[in-house]
Amino acid sequence: MITSCSKLPESLPLGRLFLYLFNERFYKIEWNSITTFERGYFMTLVQASFFSKNLNRQVYYNAMIPTTQQPLRTLYLLHGWSGSHDDWIKRTRVLELAEKYHIAIIFPNGENSFYVDFSDAESYGKMVAEDLVTETRQLFNLSDKREDTWIAGLSMGGYGALRLGFLYSHNFSKITAMSSRIIAKGMDGLDYQDYNQLPPTLKNIFIRKTPSEIEQELDLCVLAKRVKQWPKIELYCGREDDFYQDNKNFYHWLKQKCSTVNFYEAEGDHNWDYWNHVIEPVIQQLVAE
């Protein structure tokens, strides 16, 4: 466990590699400091790994950390199917936007898990919402206030943001889901008990769950009904996206339960052109009071 006195330096030289030992656990952290001459402060891109108790192994993540004396507002930004913690950095201008809006962004590696929890030491949702949130708050100068902590993602990561945002609504004040896979019985056109008709992206997830577990642990409508403290929810989807109608249907259902939900549609498909286009409006909505 890293104590608050073990926080790392606010800015470090470009490309320098650090090895830290905390309570007999090594942390390998590579810092790439980006100097912003116009604004006069550093942005630090951190590539790191830590031991996740819920996965029982080392897990990689990236972090974009502005230099500041004040605790940072923080976005946990999830990738999609077949992606990794590098996707958002390599395919969009999200690092430029982190600097522009002066927020920390944490990029987890959720593999192809849908950010779901399994019983055999593979709890990917808990890894993000519990282990990684705790780890990054201890390591960096991040605010621990609910109103300063947000979660977002695209496609599989959009589902993950909704699922974790509902389950951990006491931690996340805002959820943004882009082009999300919607898992909700009767709304997504899927028969959860007929594994043969499931898309490959879902088959490996559903086959490890009973029908009851799928309903109670994965169904977004079921999870939404348990929310005690509603986050602000923003849904984005392109009209040419195969998930467009599912997202629109889910929005209309959710609007009956929650007054703080919005749906934004525009021309666009299920691709990085669309996500790179909407990521700035997404961050603008998050930082707005």
Image (cartoon, helix red, strand yellow):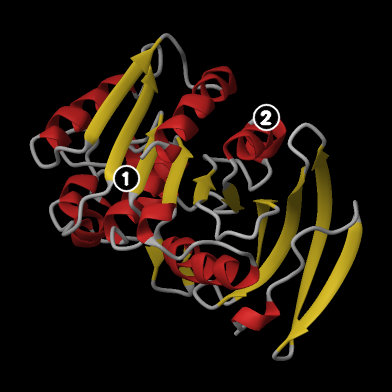
Q: Is 226 positioned to the left or the right of 232 in the image?
A: left
Residue found at x 73% / y 90%: 24
User: For the residue carrying disc 1, how many other residues have a C-alpha within 10 Å: few (<14), some (14-19), or many (20+)?
Assistant: some
In percent of width and height, residue 187 lies at 18, 33
Label 1 SS: helix
Q: Nearer the viewer, residue 226 or 259?
A: 259
Mark in the foreground, 1 or 2 = 2
In percent of width and height, residue 161 lies at 39, 47
Q: Which residue is mark 1?
A: 195
Label 2 SS: helix
Query: Is any atom of residue 121 visible in this view?
Result: yes
Q: Nearer the viewer, residue 192 or 252?
A: 252
Q: Nearer the viewer, residue 196 or 144?
A: 144
Which label number is shown at residue 91? 2
Callout count? 2
Query: Cα distance, mark 1 to mark 2?
Result: 33 Å
Name the quadrant of the N terminus: bottom right
Q: Is 139 positioned to the left or the right of 146 in the image?
A: right
Q: Is 193 positioned to the left or the right of 81 in the image?
A: left
In percent of width and height, residue 100 lies at 62, 33
* Badge 1 or badge 2: first in the primary sequence: 2
Task: Specify the amino acid type for callout 1.
Answer: Tyr
Which label number is shown at residue 90? none
Residue found at x 16% / y 37%: 254
Q: Quadrant of residue 286?
A: top left
Task: Specify the amino acid type for callout 2.
Answer: Arg
